[in-house]
Image: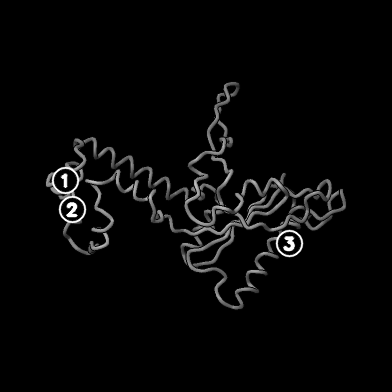
Amino acid sequence: MYTLSGTIAAAYAAVERGVPAVAFSAGNGPGRSYQSVNQNTASGFPDPATILANLSTKLVTQMAGKANGSQLLPPGYGINANYPTISSTTDDSCIQPPFIHTRMTGGASANQAVFDPSTGIFHTANSPPSSGINTCINGDCSLPGESTVQGNCQTSVSIFTVDYDAPNGTARQAAEQVMGGLVTSEADAKNYNAGSQQPPPAVSGSSSTSATASTASPSQALAVPTSDFSMFGVTLGILFALMISER
């Protein structure tokens, strides 16, 4: 879900290809000419872009020094760094935000579409923190969330992986139970030869009816008329195409 951001999506794409990556995000605006960012602002402090560049260089230099010539990060791992708003255009209240180890969720909000009746146009807004995005599944649940840290003039630094597979545990077992009778059990799937032309083994403990259904065509197994199933497949195909093009 974090690939909704073009910044971290680029980092994900690199990590997936075995290239270490750090996603840096900052919220200062508006945009300025590249010719002015090397100059001090009217308040006498460096431009926010210069401060952010120096902070980013500091983090990468630290990583390179610790790696000592080896790969910066283990395969499949990346880093997400989010800066607070730098105040140097007006004062020095937030010009050296420290790096804080965080987790990507915790107090986080998701985007939602909000209709403006005065213009007839939808715009995006943050929804209240919800249980879905803030459920701690992997990592250290005691770490502060990125959203909390950034509000205190601190830079959040989170470690992420590109492995979307759900970890073992009671929650995974509950998800597997609702698929029982149709989807191959985890134990049987581990013995399944992907190169075989034979269908996957029947779900353990399933009835003869379920076993028969597992060898039937998709439309028969789902008990959906062929025409409806075809439309369902076309819809999924369009959704996947959109997801790939966006990514």
Task: Indicate the secondary structure of the residue bearing disc 2.
Answer: loop
Evaluate if marks 1 and 2 touch, with contact meaning CB atoms under 8 Å apart.
yes
> Mark 1 or mark 3, which has the lower sequence index?
3
Q: Which residue is mark 2?
A: 202
Q: Position of residue 123 (x, y in %)?
A: 57, 32
Residue farthest toward the top in the current orientation of the protein? 118
- The three-letter amino acid code for the residue at tag 3 is Asn
- The three-letter amino acid code for the residue at tag 1 is Ser
Q: Is residue 184 above or below residue 238?
A: below
Q: In front here: 148 or 71?
A: 148
Q: In front here: 45 or 76?
A: 76
Task: Indicate the secondary structure of the residue bearing disc 3.
Answer: helix
Q: Which residue is mark 1?
A: 210
Q: Nearer the viewer, mark 2 or mark 3?
A: 2
Q: Position of residue 32 (x, y in %)?
A: 74, 49
Residue farthest toward the bottom in the current orientation of the protein? 69
Mark 1 Cα shell of 10 Å, populated few (<14), some (14-19), many (≥20) = some
